[in-house]
Protein backbone atom coordinates (compact mmCIF):
# COMPACT_ATOMS: atom_id res chain seq x y z
CA UNK A 1 0.00 0.00 0.00
CA UNK A 2 1.39 3.41 -1.00
CA UNK A 3 2.19 6.14 1.49
CA UNK A 4 -0.36 8.44 -0.20
CA UNK A 5 -3.07 5.83 0.28
CA UNK A 6 -2.20 5.46 3.97
CA UNK A 7 -2.27 9.24 4.46
CA UNK A 8 -5.64 9.40 2.71
CA UNK A 9 -7.09 6.90 5.18
CA UNK A 10 -5.19 8.23 8.20
CA UNK A 11 -4.81 12.02 7.79
CA UNK A 12 -4.73 12.56 11.56
CA UNK A 13 -1.09 12.78 12.65
CA UNK A 14 -2.10 11.85 16.21
CA UNK A 15 -2.92 8.33 15.05
CA UNK A 16 0.51 8.00 13.47
CA UNK A 17 2.03 9.34 16.68
CA UNK A 18 0.31 6.56 18.64
CA UNK A 19 1.85 4.06 16.20
CA UNK A 20 5.33 5.44 16.92
CA UNK A 21 4.72 5.37 20.64
CA UNK A 22 3.37 1.81 20.66
CA UNK A 23 6.28 0.62 18.53
CA UNK A 24 8.71 1.95 21.13
CA UNK A 25 6.65 0.32 23.84
CA UNK A 26 6.70 -2.96 21.91
CA UNK A 27 10.49 -2.82 21.92
CA UNK A 28 10.41 -2.20 25.68
CA UNK A 29 8.00 -5.15 26.09
CA UNK A 30 10.19 -7.44 24.00
CA UNK A 31 13.09 -7.23 26.44
CA UNK A 32 11.38 -8.78 29.50
CA UNK A 33 9.63 -11.32 27.26
CA UNK A 34 13.05 -12.54 26.13
CA UNK A 35 14.95 -12.29 29.43
CA UNK A 36 12.61 -12.41 32.43
CA UNK A 37 12.51 -16.20 32.77
CA UNK A 38 16.28 -16.42 32.37
CA UNK A 39 16.86 -13.76 35.00
CA UNK A 40 14.44 -15.38 37.45
CA UNK A 41 15.99 -18.80 36.85
CA UNK A 42 19.42 -17.40 37.64
CA UNK A 43 18.01 -15.97 40.86
CA UNK A 44 16.94 -19.46 41.92
CA UNK A 45 13.20 -19.33 41.17
CA UNK A 46 11.49 -22.54 40.04
CA UNK A 47 9.39 -22.98 36.90
CA UNK A 48 6.30 -22.91 39.10
CA UNK A 49 7.40 -19.58 40.59
CA UNK A 50 7.98 -18.15 37.13
CA UNK A 51 4.52 -19.25 35.99
CA UNK A 52 2.73 -17.75 39.00
CA UNK A 53 4.58 -14.46 38.53
CA UNK A 54 3.08 -14.33 35.03
CA UNK A 55 -0.33 -14.73 36.70
CA UNK A 56 0.42 -11.68 38.87
CA UNK A 57 0.92 -9.66 35.68
CA UNK A 58 -2.46 -10.76 34.35
CA UNK A 59 -3.96 -10.07 37.77
CA UNK A 60 -2.76 -6.48 37.57
CA UNK A 61 -4.47 -6.11 34.21
CA UNK A 62 -7.72 -7.57 35.56
CA UNK A 63 -7.61 -5.37 38.67
CA UNK A 64 -7.44 -2.10 36.73
CA UNK A 65 -9.24 -2.97 33.48
CA UNK A 66 -12.75 -1.99 34.54
CA UNK A 67 -11.78 1.12 36.56
CA UNK A 68 -9.61 2.30 33.65
CA UNK A 69 -12.65 3.48 31.69
CA UNK A 70 -13.65 5.84 34.50
CA UNK A 71 -10.03 6.94 34.97
CA UNK A 72 -9.77 7.94 31.32
CA UNK A 73 -13.10 9.78 31.41
CA UNK A 74 -11.87 11.67 34.50
CA UNK A 75 -8.30 12.47 33.46
CA UNK A 76 -8.34 11.97 29.61
CA UNK A 77 -6.74 9.27 27.50
CA UNK A 78 -3.69 11.44 26.81
CA UNK A 79 -2.81 11.96 30.48
CA UNK A 80 -3.50 8.31 31.28
CA UNK A 81 -1.20 7.19 28.46
CA UNK A 82 1.64 9.45 29.62
CA UNK A 83 1.43 8.33 33.26
CA UNK A 84 1.17 4.66 32.27
CA UNK A 85 4.22 4.85 29.99
CA UNK A 86 6.33 6.40 32.73
CA UNK A 87 4.94 3.87 35.22
CA UNK A 88 5.92 0.98 32.97
CA UNK A 89 9.38 2.48 32.56
CA UNK A 90 9.79 2.46 36.33
CA UNK A 91 8.66 -1.15 36.73
CA UNK A 92 10.69 -2.67 33.89
CA UNK A 93 13.77 -0.67 34.89
CA UNK A 94 13.50 -1.82 38.50
CA UNK A 95 12.95 -5.50 37.64
CA UNK A 96 16.60 -6.60 37.93
CA UNK A 97 17.08 -4.77 41.23
CA UNK A 98 14.43 -6.61 43.28
CA UNK A 99 15.25 -9.91 44.94
CA UNK A 100 12.43 -11.63 46.81
CA UNK A 101 9.32 -13.31 45.40
CA UNK A 102 6.90 -10.77 46.97
CA UNK A 103 8.93 -7.93 45.45
CA UNK A 104 8.83 -9.51 42.00
CA UNK A 105 5.09 -10.17 42.40
CA UNK A 106 4.47 -6.51 43.31
CA UNK A 107 6.45 -5.34 40.28
CA UNK A 108 4.50 -7.65 38.00
CA UNK A 109 1.14 -6.43 39.34
CA UNK A 110 2.14 -2.80 38.73
CA UNK A 111 3.45 -3.82 35.31
CA UNK A 112 0.00 -5.20 34.44
CA UNK A 113 -1.77 -2.08 35.73
CA UNK A 114 0.43 0.23 33.66
CA UNK A 115 0.03 -2.00 30.61
CA UNK A 116 -3.75 -1.91 30.70
CA UNK A 117 -3.60 1.87 31.06
CA UNK A 118 -1.49 2.07 27.93
CA UNK A 119 -3.71 -0.28 25.92
CA UNK A 120 -7.04 1.26 26.84
CA UNK A 121 -5.74 4.82 26.35
CA UNK A 122 -4.23 4.03 22.94
CA UNK A 123 -7.34 2.18 21.77
CA UNK A 124 -9.59 5.01 22.93
CA UNK A 125 -7.49 7.57 21.06
CA UNK A 126 -7.45 5.48 17.89
CA UNK A 127 -11.17 4.70 17.85
CA UNK A 128 -12.14 8.28 18.62
CA UNK A 129 -9.98 9.69 15.80
CA UNK A 130 -10.33 7.01 13.09
CA UNK A 131 -12.75 7.40 10.20
CA UNK A 132 -15.52 4.85 10.76
CA UNK A 133 -14.87 3.40 7.31
CA UNK A 134 -11.30 2.46 8.21
CA UNK A 135 -11.40 1.53 11.90
CA UNK A 136 -10.10 -2.02 11.40
CA UNK A 137 -7.40 -0.70 9.07
CA UNK A 138 -6.28 1.82 11.69
CA UNK A 139 -6.29 -0.74 14.51
CA UNK A 140 -4.46 -3.33 12.39
CA UNK A 141 -1.57 -0.92 11.85
CA UNK A 142 -1.52 -0.37 15.62
CA UNK A 143 -1.18 -4.14 16.13
CA UNK A 144 1.53 -4.32 13.47
CA UNK A 145 3.50 -1.48 15.09
CA UNK A 146 3.47 -3.28 18.43
CA UNK A 147 4.30 -6.59 16.74
CA UNK A 148 7.34 -5.07 15.06
CA UNK A 149 8.44 -3.81 18.45
CA UNK A 150 8.13 -7.34 19.81
CA UNK A 151 10.53 -8.48 17.08
CA UNK A 152 13.07 -5.71 17.69
CA UNK A 153 12.97 -5.97 21.49
CA UNK A 154 14.28 -9.54 21.83
CA UNK A 155 16.97 -8.86 19.24
CA UNK A 156 18.09 -5.82 21.23
CA UNK A 157 17.98 -7.85 24.45
CA UNK A 158 20.11 -10.58 22.89
CA UNK A 159 22.74 -8.08 21.74
CA UNK A 160 22.90 -6.29 25.09
CA UNK A 161 23.10 -9.58 27.02
CA UNK A 162 25.90 -10.72 24.71
CA UNK A 163 28.11 -7.72 25.45
CA UNK A 164 27.01 -6.68 28.95
CA UNK A 165 25.23 -8.01 32.03
CA UNK A 166 21.63 -9.02 31.37
CA UNK A 167 20.35 -6.42 33.84
CA UNK A 168 21.41 -3.61 31.50
CA UNK A 169 18.78 -4.67 28.96
CA UNK A 170 15.96 -4.01 31.45
CA UNK A 171 17.32 -0.55 32.14
CA UNK A 172 17.49 0.09 28.38
CA UNK A 173 13.85 -0.98 28.08
CA UNK A 174 12.92 1.52 30.80
CA UNK A 175 14.71 4.29 28.93
CA UNK A 176 12.87 3.42 25.71
CA UNK A 177 9.53 3.58 27.55
CA UNK A 178 10.51 7.00 28.93
CA UNK A 179 11.24 8.17 25.38
CA UNK A 180 7.80 6.95 24.31
CA UNK A 181 6.21 8.90 27.17
CA UNK A 182 8.15 12.05 26.28
CA UNK A 183 7.08 11.73 22.63
CA UNK A 184 3.41 11.54 23.64
CA UNK A 185 3.80 14.42 26.11
CA UNK A 186 5.42 16.68 23.53
CA UNK A 187 3.40 15.89 20.41
CA UNK A 188 0.01 14.29 21.16
CA UNK A 189 -2.98 16.65 21.00
CA UNK A 190 -5.68 16.69 23.70
CA UNK A 191 -8.51 14.19 23.38
CA UNK A 192 -11.23 14.95 20.86
CA UNK A 193 -14.41 16.17 22.60
CA UNK A 194 -16.54 13.15 21.72
CA UNK A 195 -14.26 10.86 23.71
CA UNK A 196 -15.84 12.20 26.90
CA UNK A 197 -18.88 14.37 26.39
CA UNK A 198 -20.72 13.87 23.13
CA UNK A 199 -22.22 11.59 20.56
CA UNK A 200 -21.19 12.30 16.97
CA UNK A 201 -24.12 13.03 14.67
CA UNK A 202 -23.24 13.34 10.98
CA UNK A 203 -24.59 16.37 9.20
CA UNK A 204 -25.89 16.33 5.67
CA UNK A 205 -22.70 17.89 4.41
CA UNK A 206 -19.99 16.03 2.57
CA UNK A 207 -16.73 14.65 3.94
CA UNK A 208 -14.24 16.87 5.67
CA UNK A 209 -11.67 18.46 3.42
CA UNK A 210 -8.80 18.21 5.89
CA UNK A 211 -5.54 17.49 4.16
CA UNK A 212 -2.87 14.95 5.06
CA UNK A 213 -1.12 17.31 7.45
CA UNK A 214 -4.22 18.31 9.39
CA UNK A 215 -4.11 17.09 12.97
CA UNK A 216 -7.90 16.96 13.30
CA UNK A 217 -9.75 13.65 12.92
CA UNK A 218 -11.24 13.02 9.45
CA UNK A 219 -14.88 13.28 10.53
CA UNK A 220 -17.71 14.83 8.57
CA UNK A 221 -19.01 18.12 9.87
CA UNK A 222 -20.65 17.18 13.15
CA UNK A 223 -22.80 18.51 15.90
CA UNK A 224 -22.26 17.33 19.45
CA UNK A 225 -25.32 16.15 21.34
CA UNK A 226 -24.83 15.08 24.97
CA UNK A 227 -25.86 11.48 25.59
CA UNK A 228 -26.45 9.62 28.86
CA UNK A 229 -23.76 7.07 29.68
CA UNK A 230 -24.63 3.45 28.96
CA UNK A 231 -24.60 0.95 31.81
CA UNK A 232 -21.84 -1.64 31.97
CA UNK A 233 -24.30 -4.43 31.13
CA UNK A 234 -25.65 -2.48 28.16
CA UNK A 235 -22.11 -1.98 26.85
CA UNK A 236 -21.32 -5.66 27.36
CA UNK A 237 -24.43 -6.56 25.37
CA UNK A 238 -23.18 -4.46 22.46
CA UNK A 239 -19.61 -5.78 22.49
CA UNK A 240 -20.23 -9.39 23.55
CA UNK A 241 -18.76 -10.91 20.39
CA UNK A 242 -15.64 -8.71 20.63
CA UNK A 243 -15.24 -9.68 24.30
CA UNK A 244 -15.55 -13.40 23.53
CA UNK A 245 -12.98 -12.97 20.76
CA UNK A 246 -10.42 -11.16 22.91
CA UNK A 247 -10.95 -13.58 25.83
CA UNK A 248 -10.31 -16.51 23.48
CA UNK A 249 -7.21 -14.85 22.06
CA UNK A 250 -5.76 -14.00 25.47
CA UNK A 251 -6.48 -17.54 26.69
CA UNK A 252 -4.98 -19.12 23.57
CA UNK A 253 -1.94 -16.85 23.33
CA UNK A 254 -0.90 -17.28 26.97
CA UNK A 255 -1.38 -21.05 26.80
CA UNK A 256 0.43 -21.63 23.53
CA UNK A 257 3.45 -19.51 24.46
CA UNK A 258 4.01 -21.61 27.58
CA UNK A 259 2.99 -25.11 26.51
CA UNK A 260 3.29 -25.55 22.74
CA UNK A 261 7.12 -25.73 22.88
CA UNK A 262 6.89 -28.36 25.65
CA UNK A 263 4.37 -30.33 23.60
CA UNK A 264 6.61 -30.25 20.54
CA UNK A 265 9.59 -31.47 22.57
CA UNK A 266 7.75 -34.24 24.42
CA UNK A 267 5.29 -35.48 21.79
CA UNK A 268 7.00 -34.67 18.49
CA UNK A 269 10.66 -35.07 19.46
CA UNK A 270 11.60 -31.62 18.17
CA UNK A 271 14.85 -30.17 19.50
CA UNK A 272 14.51 -27.50 22.16
CA UNK A 273 16.63 -25.03 20.15
CA UNK A 274 14.18 -25.27 17.24
CA UNK A 275 11.11 -24.57 19.36
CA UNK A 276 12.47 -21.07 20.03
CA UNK A 277 11.55 -20.25 16.41
CA UNK A 278 7.90 -21.28 16.73
CA UNK A 279 6.59 -18.03 18.29
CA UNK A 280 8.32 -16.09 15.51
CA UNK A 281 6.21 -17.89 12.90
CA UNK A 282 3.04 -17.04 14.85
CA UNK A 283 4.00 -13.35 14.98
CA UNK A 284 5.02 -13.37 11.32
CA UNK A 285 1.62 -14.72 10.35
CA UNK A 286 -0.10 -11.90 12.21
CA UNK A 287 2.13 -9.27 10.64
CA UNK A 288 1.64 -10.70 7.16
CA UNK A 289 -2.15 -10.86 7.12
CA UNK A 290 -3.63 -8.50 9.72
CA UNK A 291 -3.66 -5.43 7.46
CA UNK A 292 -5.30 -7.32 4.59
CA UNK A 293 -7.94 -8.83 6.85
CA UNK A 294 -8.61 -5.43 8.40
CA UNK A 295 -9.40 -3.88 5.02
CA UNK A 296 -11.64 -6.83 4.17
CA UNK A 297 -13.49 -6.43 7.47
CA UNK A 298 -14.01 -2.70 6.97
CA UNK A 299 -15.57 -3.42 3.60
CA UNK A 300 -17.56 -6.62 4.07
CA UNK A 301 -18.26 -6.88 7.79
CA UNK A 302 -16.08 -7.38 10.82
CA UNK A 303 -18.02 -10.19 12.44
CA UNK A 304 -18.25 -12.17 9.20
CA UNK A 305 -14.48 -12.00 8.89
CA UNK A 306 -14.00 -12.98 12.55
CA UNK A 307 -16.09 -16.12 11.99
CA UNK A 308 -14.06 -17.12 8.94
CA UNK A 309 -10.73 -16.48 10.68
CA UNK A 310 -11.88 -18.38 13.77
CA UNK A 311 -12.96 -21.40 11.69
CA UNK A 312 -9.66 -21.57 9.79
CA UNK A 313 -7.68 -21.09 12.99
CA UNK A 314 -9.60 -23.90 14.69
CA UNK A 315 -8.59 -26.28 11.90
CA UNK A 316 -4.95 -25.23 12.28
CA UNK A 317 -5.00 -25.86 16.05
CA UNK A 318 -6.40 -29.34 15.37
CA UNK A 319 -3.56 -29.77 12.88
CA UNK A 320 -1.03 -29.34 15.68
CA UNK A 321 -2.14 -32.75 16.97
CA UNK A 322 -1.48 -34.70 13.77
CA UNK A 323 1.43 -32.82 12.16
CA UNK A 324 4.82 -34.36 12.89
CA UNK A 325 7.21 -32.51 10.58
CA UNK A 326 8.81 -29.45 12.16
CA UNK A 327 8.54 -27.37 8.99
CA UNK A 328 4.91 -28.34 8.45
CA UNK A 329 4.27 -27.40 12.09
CA UNK A 330 5.87 -23.98 11.48
CA UNK A 331 3.58 -23.50 8.48
CA UNK A 332 0.54 -24.40 10.60
CA UNK A 333 1.66 -22.01 13.33
CA UNK A 334 2.08 -19.28 10.67
CA UNK A 335 -1.50 -19.83 9.46
CA UNK A 336 -2.79 -19.91 13.04
CA UNK A 337 -1.07 -16.59 13.69
CA UNK A 338 -2.39 -15.02 10.49
CA UNK A 339 -5.96 -16.01 11.40
CA UNK A 340 -6.39 -16.11 15.18
CA UNK A 341 -4.04 -13.20 15.94
CA UNK A 342 -5.69 -11.14 13.20
CA UNK A 343 -9.05 -11.48 14.97
CA UNK A 344 -7.87 -9.13 17.73
CA UNK A 345 -7.68 -5.85 15.75
CA UNK A 346 -10.84 -6.72 13.80
CA UNK A 347 -12.76 -7.34 17.03
CA UNK A 348 -11.62 -3.97 18.36
CA UNK A 349 -12.75 -2.30 15.13
CA UNK A 350 -16.18 -3.95 15.46
CA UNK A 351 -16.39 -2.52 18.95
CA UNK A 352 -15.66 0.95 17.57
CA UNK A 353 -18.52 0.53 15.10
CA UNK A 354 -21.19 -0.45 17.65
CA UNK A 355 -20.28 1.77 20.62
CA UNK A 356 -21.00 5.51 20.82
CA UNK A 357 -17.83 7.66 21.11
CA UNK A 358 -18.56 8.80 24.70
CA UNK A 359 -18.46 5.14 25.77
CA UNK A 360 -15.21 4.19 24.00
CA UNK A 361 -13.03 4.30 27.11
CA UNK A 362 -15.44 2.22 29.26
CA UNK A 363 -16.04 -0.28 26.46
CA UNK A 364 -12.29 -0.64 25.89
CA UNK A 365 -11.84 -1.22 29.63
CA UNK A 366 -14.39 -4.06 29.58
CA UNK A 367 -12.78 -5.45 26.42
CA UNK A 368 -9.34 -5.52 28.03
CA UNK A 369 -10.75 -7.08 31.20
CA UNK A 370 -11.88 -10.05 29.10
CA UNK A 371 -8.47 -10.21 27.40
CA UNK A 372 -6.69 -10.21 30.75
CA UNK A 373 -9.08 -12.81 32.16
CA UNK A 374 -8.18 -15.09 29.27
CA UNK A 375 -4.49 -14.53 29.91
CA UNK A 376 -5.02 -15.33 33.59
CA UNK A 377 -7.14 -18.47 33.16
CA UNK A 378 -5.47 -19.90 30.05
CA UNK A 379 -2.15 -21.02 31.56
CA UNK A 380 -3.83 -22.32 34.72
CA UNK A 381 -6.45 -24.49 32.97
CA UNK A 382 -4.21 -25.52 30.06
CA UNK A 383 -1.40 -26.42 32.46
CA UNK A 384 -3.73 -28.57 34.56
CA UNK A 385 -5.01 -30.41 31.46
CA UNK A 386 -1.46 -30.85 30.14
CA UNK A 387 -0.22 -32.23 33.46
CA UNK A 388 -3.08 -34.69 33.96
CA UNK A 389 -3.96 -35.78 30.43
CA UNK A 390 -1.14 -34.73 28.10
CA UNK A 391 -0.60 -32.29 25.27
CA UNK A 392 -3.24 -33.61 22.86
CA UNK A 393 -6.24 -32.97 25.17
CA UNK A 394 -4.75 -29.57 25.95
CA UNK A 395 -4.70 -28.64 22.25
CA UNK A 396 -8.15 -30.11 21.66
CA UNK A 397 -9.69 -27.99 24.39
CA UNK A 398 -8.19 -24.88 22.73
CA UNK A 399 -9.76 -25.92 19.42
CA UNK A 400 -13.13 -26.44 21.17
CA UNK A 401 -12.91 -22.93 22.61
CA UNK A 402 -12.35 -21.38 19.17
CA UNK A 403 -15.14 -23.52 17.72
CA UNK A 404 -17.45 -22.21 20.45
CA UNK A 405 -16.50 -18.66 19.48
CA UNK A 406 -17.40 -19.31 15.82
CA UNK A 407 -20.81 -20.67 16.88
CA UNK A 408 -21.37 -17.72 19.24
CA UNK A 409 -20.42 -15.20 16.54
CA UNK A 410 -22.80 -16.93 14.11
CA UNK A 411 -25.71 -16.81 16.55
CA UNK A 412 -25.15 -13.10 17.21
CA UNK A 413 -24.18 -12.12 13.66
CA UNK A 414 -26.79 -9.35 13.77
CA UNK A 415 -24.50 -7.48 16.19
CA UNK A 416 -22.50 -6.36 13.16
CA UNK A 417 -23.93 -3.13 11.63
CA UNK A 418 -22.70 -4.23 8.19
CA UNK A 419 -24.76 -7.43 8.37
CA UNK A 420 -27.86 -5.46 9.37
CA UNK A 421 -27.30 -2.96 6.55
CA UNK A 422 -26.97 -5.75 4.00
CA UNK A 423 -30.20 -7.35 5.22
CA UNK A 424 -32.15 -4.09 5.18
CA UNK A 425 -30.66 -2.50 2.04
CA UNK A 426 -28.83 -5.21 0.03
CA UNK A 427 -28.36 -3.07 -3.09
CA UNK A 428 -27.00 -0.05 -1.22
CA UNK A 429 -24.77 -2.20 0.96
CA UNK A 430 -23.26 -3.90 -2.08
CA UNK A 431 -22.63 -0.55 -3.73
Image (cartoon, rainbow, N blue to C red):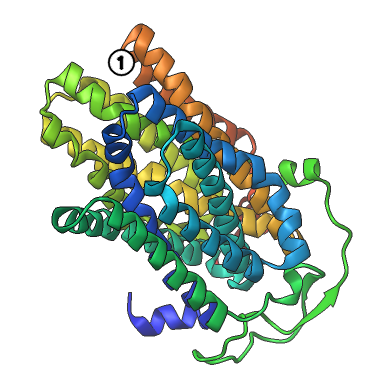
Mark 1: few, some, or many residues within 10 Å (few <14, many ≥20)?
some
- Quarter of the image containing the C terminus? bottom right
Whether 21 is drawn above or below 281: the answer is below
Q: In front here: 342 or 307?
A: 342
| Residue 302 is at least partly visible in this image | no
Is 234 left or right of 157, judged from the image as shown? right
Q: In front here: 112 or 23?
A: 112
- Quarter of the image containing the N terminus? bottom left
- Percent position (x, y) of residue 303? 55, 47
| Secondary element type, mark 1 | helix
Is 204 left or right of 45, judged from the image as shown? right
Whether 268 is drawn above or below 408: the answer is above
Q: In front here: 215 or 43?
A: 43
- Percent position (x, y) of residue 292? 37, 60
Is 324 left or right of 219, judged from the image as shown? left
Residue positioned 35% across, 8% down in the render: 389
Residue positioned 48% across, 77% down in the render: 183
Residue at label 1? 392
Q: Quadrant of residue 162?
A: bottom left
Residue positioned 83% across, 47% down in the render: 231
Is 272 left or right of 262, judged from the image as shown? left
- Percent position (x, y) of residue 357? 72, 64
Amino acid sequence: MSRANVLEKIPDRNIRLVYASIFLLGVAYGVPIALSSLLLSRRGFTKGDIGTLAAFFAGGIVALSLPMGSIIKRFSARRTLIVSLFGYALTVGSFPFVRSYPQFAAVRVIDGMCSVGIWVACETILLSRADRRYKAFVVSLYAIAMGLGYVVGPVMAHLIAHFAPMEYAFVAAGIISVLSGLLVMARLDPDVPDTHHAHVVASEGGPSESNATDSKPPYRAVSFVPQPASSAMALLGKIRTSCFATFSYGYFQASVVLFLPLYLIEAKGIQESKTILVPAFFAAGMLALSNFTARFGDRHGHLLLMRVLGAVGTVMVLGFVWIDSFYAMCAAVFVAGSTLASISPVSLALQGAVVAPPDYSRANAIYNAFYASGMLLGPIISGAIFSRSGGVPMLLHLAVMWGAFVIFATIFRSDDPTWRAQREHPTAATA
